[in-house]
Image (spheres, grey):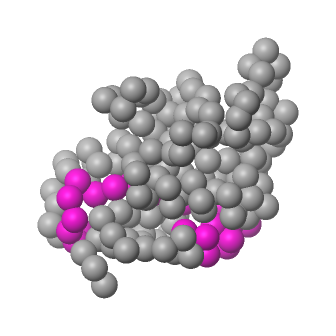
């Protein structure tokens, strides 16, 4: 295996990913989500290529401030991205298809993320295939594709795994 560049936290285990992963590496774990017992994945980029023992706790904690996460089931999931300063936008955002949601009404779709219902707008609901495309883009580019809308969540302290 190549030296890891990213980590995916899958609730009960971590996957350390190298620089040559394919879309399949992201699609398969998302297809396994059921919304109840397997319901979340979080991916973050390592500060530099290396193995767990190559990093201090502070380096790992700092790396976890930028991430992409999904929650829900393979059929209905939400995608969120945490962007640090210096990328034009800072904070935690729910990813959606354009056009951006009409924020004059409350979110109307409930996605089950374990025991917690999460409310999102219809344009923010993804199946595993499209979410995997977003994950793969994030893995390669450190952000979501520019064609997607970002809605601030108002919760800048989301868990990072």
Instruction: Place residue 26 in its image quadrant.
Output: bottom right
Q: Is residue 62 left or right of residue 119?
A: left
The residue located at (40%, 51%) in the rendering is 141
As for residue 135 lying within the magenta part, the answer is no
The residue located at (77%, 34%) in the rendering is 121
Up-down relation of residue 128 to residue 61 (above or below):
below
Up-down relation of residue 78 to residue 93 (above or below):
below
Q: Quadrant of the N terminus?
A: bottom left
Q: Position of residue 40 (x, y in %)?
A: 59, 58
Instruction: Place residue 146 in its image quadrant.
Output: top right
Magenta-highlighted residues: 26-52
The residue lying toward the viewer, choosing from 137 and 54, is 137
Up-down relation of residue 48 to residue 149 (above or below):
below
Q: Is residue 88 left or right of residue 3?
A: right
Q: Position of residue 82 (x, y in %)?
A: 46, 39
Q: Is residue 45 left or right of residue 106?
A: left
Instruction: Place residue 86 in its image quadrant.
Output: top left
Q: Position of residue 11 (x, y in %)?
A: 52, 64
Q: Quadrant of the C terminus?
A: bottom left
Residue lying farthest to the top in this orientation: 104
The residue located at (75%, 46%) in the rendering is 125
Q: Is residue 57 visible?
A: no
As for residue 31 lying within the magenta part, the answer is yes
């Amino acid at each position: 295996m190549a030296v890891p560049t990213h980590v995916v936290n899958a609730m009960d285990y971590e996957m350390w990913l190298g620089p040559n992963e394919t879309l399949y590496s992201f699609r398969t774990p998302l297809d396994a989500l059921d919304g109840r017992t397997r319901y979340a994945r979080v991916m973050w980029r390592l500060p530099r290529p290396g193995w767990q023992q190559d990093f201090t706790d502070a380096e790992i904690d700092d790396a976890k401030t930028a991430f992409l996460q999904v929650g829900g089931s393979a059929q209905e999931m939400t995608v969120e991205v945490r962007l640090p300063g210096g990328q034009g936008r800072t904070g935690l955002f729910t990813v959606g298809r354009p056009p951006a949601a009409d924020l004059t009404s409350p979110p109307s779709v409930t996605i089950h993320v374990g025991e917690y219902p999460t409310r999102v707008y219809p344009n923010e609901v993804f199946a595993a295939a499209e979410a995997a495309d977003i994950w793969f883009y994030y893995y390669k580019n450190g952000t979501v594709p520019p064609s997607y809308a970002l809605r601030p969540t108002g919760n800048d302290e989301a868990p990072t795994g």
